[in-house]
Image (cartoon, rainbow, N blue to C red):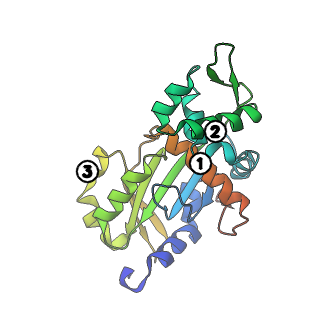
């Protein structure tokens, strides 16, 4: 069955099936977002206790600028305690001019302040919702390539799941130990029956890079602002 499908058609069949909103209710769904760590076939964004519409509103209420072009990395470092300009340069790998521009932007938005001692501190006004991100990688046959890409997504995502067609379940289960060690998730999707079946359920973990996470939040905001009709699809609970 999968030989007659393109990967694009496989992803589309997955998101349009009735089982999709049942397994991932109240998630905001976005596709083709350039994350800097690849382009996941599908991203689900969740705010705990919120509907998908409220999650979309929370994203759209934020400006993208403080998360992009290195500013997100600076903002991530300011979450902990006050820091010097030199420290921020070392931690982010950015030039002094780049860090200064990022700090100027954050201070202008009142997301950061400078103390009397010249240290920079994240402002209490910088209230950023804790978005939970799940990234999906779909492949028709190539399990190893799907796993490699999903591992990259862990830089910014709280969970990453590889999905293959139902007839590839045996090969996918054959790498279950590797999937578990990598703290990934794996599942099959049967296009005919429209059923999603886990081989390994994903674990929710903190993103490996707070810098990458901040950058992707900015990318998600940009994607929502673009007005792309594939962005921000919301799936109601199954009745």
Q: Which of the numbered marks, if any, corresponds to residue 178?
A: 3
Quadrant, the C terminus? bottom right
Q: Secondary structure at mark 2?
A: helix
Q: Earlier in the sequence, mark 3 or mark 1?
A: 1
Q: Nearer the viewer, residue 37 or 139?
A: 37
Q: Does residue 27 appear in the picture of this structure?
A: no
Left or right of residue 140: residue 59: right
Q: Earlier in the sequence, mark 2 or mark 1?
A: 1
Q: Circle 1 sits on which residue?
A: 69
Q: Which of the numbered marks, if any, corresponds to residue 137?
A: none
Residue visible at 45% across and 47% down in the picture: 159
Residue 77 in picture, x, y percent from top left:
54, 30
Residue visible at 65% across and 39% down in the picture: 101
Residue 92 in picture, x, y percent from top left:
49, 36
Instruction: Mark 2 and mark 1 in contact? Answer it, CB < 8 Å.
Output: yes
Outermost residue, bottom side: 4
Q: Which image quadrant for residue 138?
A: bottom left
* Nearest to viewer (mark 3 / mark 2): 2
Quadrant, the N terminus? bottom left
Left or right of residue 77: residue 232: right
Q: Secondary structure at mark 3?
A: helix
In space, the residues marked 2 and 1 are separated at their CA atoms by 8 Å
Instruction: Mark 3 and mark 1 in contact? Answer it, CB < 8 Å.
Output: no
Q: Mark 2, residues whose alpha carbon is within 10 Å: few (<14), some, or many (≥20)?
A: many
Q: Nearer the viewer, residue 73 or 191?
A: 73
Residue 133 vs 8, above or below: the answer is: above
Left or right of residue 14: residue 105: right
* Nearest to viewer (mark 3 / mark 1): 1
Q: Circle 2 sits on which residue?
A: 102
Instruction: Mark 3 and mark 2 in contact? Answer it, CB < 8 Å.
Output: no
Residue 205 in picture, x, y percent from top left:
44, 39
Residue visible at 55% across and 35% down in the picture: 96
């Amino acid at each position: 069955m999968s030989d007659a499908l393109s990967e694009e058609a496989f992803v589309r069949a997955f998101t349009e099936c009735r089982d999709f909103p049942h397994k991932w209710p109240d998630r905001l769904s976005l596709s083709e977002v350039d994350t800097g760590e690849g382009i996941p076939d599908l991203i689900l964004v969740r705010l705990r206790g919120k509907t998908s519409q409220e999650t979309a509103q929370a994203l759209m209420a934020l400006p993208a600028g403080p998360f992009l072009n290195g500013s997100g990395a600076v903002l991530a470092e300011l979450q902990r305690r006050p820091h010097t300009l030199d420290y921020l340069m070392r931690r982010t790998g950015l030039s002094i001019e780049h860090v200064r521009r990022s700090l100027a932007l954050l201070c202008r938005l009142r997301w950061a302040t400078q103390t009397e001692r010249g240290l920079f501190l994240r402002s209490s006004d910088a209230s950023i919702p804790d978005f939970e991100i799940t990234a999906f990688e779909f492949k028709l046959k190539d399990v190893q390539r799907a796993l490699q890409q999903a591992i990259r997504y862990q830089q910014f995502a709280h969970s990453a799941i590889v999905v293959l067609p139902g007839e590839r379940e045996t090969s996918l289960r054959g790498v279950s130990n590797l999937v578990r060690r990598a703290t990934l998730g794996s599942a099959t999707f049967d296009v005919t029956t429209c059923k999603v079946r886990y081989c390994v359920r994903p674990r929710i973990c903190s993103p490996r890079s707070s810098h990458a996470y901040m950058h992707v939040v900015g990318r998600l905001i940009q994607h929502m602002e673009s007005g792309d009709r594939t962005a921000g699809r919301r799936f109601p609970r199954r009745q």
